[in-house]
Image (cartoon, rainbow, N blue to C red):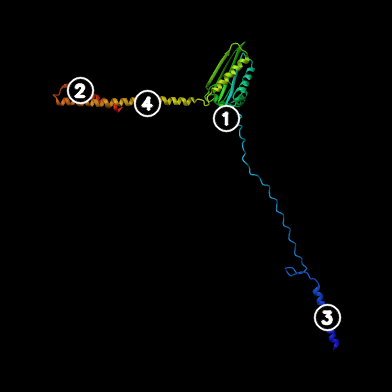
Amino acid sequence: MRSSSLGVLCTLLVLSASAAADRRRPRPKPDKAGKADRKAPEPAPTPEPAPAPPAVPSPQPAIKPAADPGGPPPPEKRRMVGILDVRVDGVPDEVKIAFERGLEEQLDTKVYWLSSRAQMHDRMKFSTRWTEGCLVGSCLAELRAQTSAELVLLAAFNGSGTSFGHVVTIVRTDNGRVLSQESGRCEVCTVQEAMTEATLATLQLLNAVPDKLPDEAGDQSVAMDLVTSASRARLADAHRDIRRRGIAMTLIGLAVAGGGLATYLITDKPDYALAVTAAGGGLLLGGVVVLTF
């Protein structure tokens, strides 16, 4: 009986020891799903954001540099003058080049834009409406359209021994008419002195050109309007004068005819009363005719 009790007691002690050993052994912590020994999956690496494209600067309007107030104005602000023809007779051909060079050096570049003969002829060589020899007249309209020259310059030099002369002419290209002209002659001088005199004469002509060229067609139209207005005024005055005369004739005729008729009826019907009445009637009729026309 005692042996069986001891056996049972031993068995209980062995089971208690085994249970205590199990409790002291570390156990893995279960995950949210309740499964032990399963590791949570590592999160996938976040992709790096693509680099932003470089910012393109918005186009800025081009800023035009301010014009130098002390420098010459642009060509379109100046009056263009073209050297169309330079003729020489009895003087060296070098005079042509010297004349153009002298003008370029002394001409006021703030007012004028000078185009040489070579430049003018180079611009006109492809024109089908202009030909060499066109110096004045309506043919210059094509030159104006191709070169924008408002004025053209014609020069002629002649010499013999120590005597030299020059003629400088400025021609308008809008109507082909001569605007101004200057001539001179030096009996005893050198070629250089003659060139200097011609250059100064040309500069004087150009400086005398008005800022606005006279509109000859407009001037003629204004003159015609003035003449027409004066004629109309004179006609109106004459018409008023004729009307006044017609009224006067009508009134006088009426009075004379009335007086003659009254005399004829009141008195013993004299013959002169009929004559007075007839005269008054004539004046009355003439006045009516004048007023009618």
Circle 2 residues within 10 Å: few <14, some 14–19, many ≥20: many
Measured as percent of width and height from the top left, residue 114 is found at 60, 25
Circle 3 residues within 10 Å: few <14, some 14–19, many ≥20: few
Measured as percent of width and height from the top left, residue 150 is found at 55, 26
Q: CA distance from mark 3 to mark 1?
A: 125 Å
Residue at (55% x, 17% y) in the render: 182
Query: Counting residues from the N terminus, which is met first, the one under dot 3 or under dot 1?
Result: 3
Q: Which residue is mark 2?
A: 276
Q: Which residue is mark 1?
A: 77
* Nearer the camera: disc 2 or disc 3: 3
Q: Residue furthest bottom?
A: 1
Q: Nearer the viewer, residue 114 or 64?
A: 64
Query: Counting residues from the N terminus, which is met first, the one under dot 4 or under dot 1?
Result: 1
Residue at (17% x, 26% y) in the render: 262
Q: CA distance from mark 2 to mark 1?
A: 84 Å
Q: Amino acid at mark 4?
A: Ala
Task: Name the secondary structure under disc 1.
Answer: helix
Q: Amino acid at mark 3?
A: Leu
* Nearer the camera: disc 3 or disc 1: 3
* Nearer the camera: disc 3 or disc 4: 3
* Nearer the camera: disc 2 or disc 1: 1
Measured as percent of width and height from the top left, residue 95 is found at 63, 17
Q: Which residue is mark 4?
A: 233
Q: Which mark is residue 13?
A: 3
Q: CA distance from mark 2 to mark 4?
A: 39 Å
**Res 22 → quadrant:** bottom right
Pick the quarter of the image with the N terminus.
Answer: bottom right
